[in-house]
Amino acid sequence: MSQRHLNVADLMTSLAAYDPRTPVRLALSPEWPFEHYVGAVTATPNIPPTAHLDAPASSPGPDSEQLGTVWIGDGGQLGYLPPEAWVELHHDPYDDLTTA
């Protein structure tokens, strides 16, 4: 999944490919990769996410402000990310770490 702007449906579709009992972790700090637990999940209704430079140029539309944003928190560091996971995560065409 190389999309940078996911919504809940995109995330659910990606996760549906795995056994529901499979543990989920966050991979953070790509140059020195760490494995983190998933923390709390919350939402800010009516507050859209911050726009970034890589956001699509077109307006997200009137419904996006009404939907707000879902936030997935960091539940704490577990250890280093396995090298195999780092390699798989860096197939992102926007990521320049594999060309260094």
Image: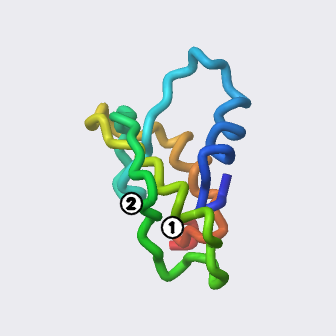
Tell me: residue 64, above or below residue 82: below
Label 2 is placed on what type of residue? Glu
What residue does disc 1 label? 97
Q: In the rendered view, tell whether residue 86 sits above or below residue 15.
A: below
Please provide percent x and percent y for residue 51: 47, 75
Q: Secondary structure at mark 2?
A: loop
- The answer to which of 35 and 15 lies nearer the viewer is 15
Q: Residue at x 49, y 42 (%)?
A: 83
Give the amino acid at mark 1: Leu
Q: CA distance from mark 1 to mark 2?
A: 8 Å
Q: Going by the image, does 89 lie left or right of 38? A: right
Where 56 sits versus 48, above or below? below
Q: Position of residue 63 (x, y in %)?
A: 62, 63
Q: Residue at x 57, y 50 (%)?
A: 89
Residue lying at the far top of the rendered structure: 21
Compared across the picture, whether 29 is left or right of 2 comes to left
Question: Residue 9: where, in percent of width, then height?
Answer: 67, 44
- The answer to which image quadrant residue 34 occupies is top left
Q: Is residue 43 left or right of residue 10?
A: left
Q: Are marks 1 and 2 in contact (CB under 8 Å)?
A: yes
Crowd class of label 2 (few under 14; some 14 to 19; many from 20; radius 10 Å): few
Q: Residue 47's spot in the image, x, y percent?
A: 42, 61
- Mark 1 or mark 2: whose residue is earlier in sequence: 2
Seen at 66% across and 19% down, the residue is: 19
Write down the residue under mark 2: 31
Task: Give the residue displayed 67% in from the left and 51% down from the top.
Answer: 1
